[in-house]
Image (spheres, rainbow, N blue to C red):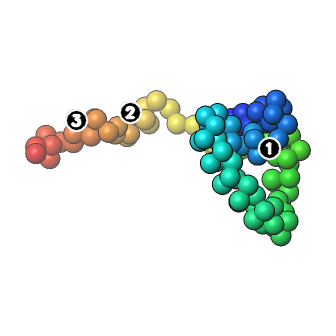
Amino acid sequence: RYAAAFLTRLNETRRDWTLSASHYHSQTPNLAEAYRARVVAAWPEEVARLASNPPGPVMARFSQGTVPSLSNGGENARIIPMQTSGGAGQGRGLDAYRAAPVPLSGRLLALLPQRLATR
């Protein structure tokens, strides 16, 4: 997005996309002119490619200035309580977690019996 915004700002002052593209690359005259020539040479092919394969609905939204937000779906997550014979779910108690600890990367050897922990 930054590159597109920068190129758009350049074009606001230059009013010429080829000049803006050359200045996007470099404002040193000989470097800018070489880059402009490459852009002008590639431009007709890009226009033809776009005409034969127009952007789909997702890219069309980008061209209208709206940008969809990325989401992992967390806003739609539900917490489903576990039912017990007594009614509402209670989950596991602390004693259940202590009885079956989850080993961490650095603690694996500490949880093994001493005879297995030797290297």
Q: Is residue 28 above or below residue 17?
A: above
Circle 3/circle 2 CB separation < 8 Å: no
- SS of the residue under disc 1: helix
Mark 3 and mark 1 lie on one chain; the one further toward the N terminus is 1
Tell me residue 47's x, y (percent). Answer: 81, 61
What percent of the width, then of the height, locates residue 4? 73, 40
Q: Which residue is mark 2?
A: 98
Q: CA distance from mark 3 to mark 1?
A: 65 Å
Of residues 83 and 52, the one nearer the viewer is 52
Label 1: how many residues lie within 10 Å, few (<14), some (14-19) or many (20+)? some
Residue 6 showing in the rendered view: yes
Q: CA distance from mark 2 to mark 1?
A: 66 Å
Amino acid beneath label 2: Arg
- In the image, residue 117 sits, relative to residue 41, either above or below, namely above
Mark 3 sits on what residue? 110
Mark 1 is on which residue type? Trp
**Residue at (76%, 33%) from the top-left corner?**
10
Residue labelled with disc 1: 17
Is 11 located above or below residue 46 in the figure? above
Q: Residue furthest bottom?
A: 52
Instruction: Label 3, secondary structure: give it.
Output: helix
